[in-house]
Amino acid sequence: MAENKLAIHEILEIHEILTMKQTGLVRGHVSEPLIKDEKLQKIAQNHLSHAEQVIKELKELLPNRQ
């Protein structure tokens, strides 16, 4: 796989998005037990699963620090 070279501003933007997504994920996990409606619970669980996948993909974009 070809390695992408990102400019510093792109790395910073990805990091900012990653931080926002992680904050939202934490808030979602905290709020999840408070949801009583089953349909809404399922929507929230799907959202959390999707957020976890997005976070994983964003982390893959960042260069490895070695």
Image (cartoon, grey):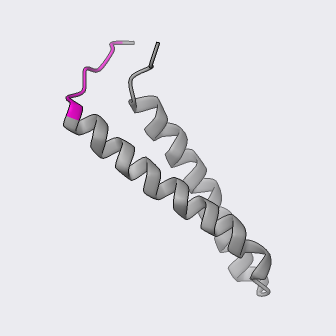
Which residue is most to the bottom?
37
Q: What residue lies at 22% left-to-right and 31% top-to-bottom?
A: 8
Q: Position of residue 26 (x, y in %)?
A: 63, 61
Q: Is residue 36 magenta?
A: no
Q: Residue furthest front?
A: 66
Which residue is at a point 60% across and 49% down the rendered structure image?
52
Residue 51 vs residue 39, the one in the foreground = 51
The N terminus - image quarter: top left
- x, y (%) of residue 16? 36, 50
Residue 37: x and y, percent? 76, 87
Tell me where residue 25 sits by quadrant: bottom right
Residue 24 x, y percent position in the rendering:
54, 63
Is residue 54 found left or right of 44 in the rendered image? left
Q: Which residue is drawn at 44% across and 20% down?
A: 64
Magenta segment, prevailing SS (helix, strand or loop): loop
Q: For the magenta stretch, what is the residue range?
A: 2-8
Residue shown at 38% from the left, 43% from the top? 15
**Does residue 42 appear in this view?**
no
> Is residue 18 toward the left or the right of residue 14 in the image?
right
Going by the image, does 60 lie left or right of 38?
left
Q: Can residue 40 be seen in this view?
A: yes
Q: Nearer the viewer, residue 38 or 58?
A: 58
Residue 7, placed above or below residue 35? above
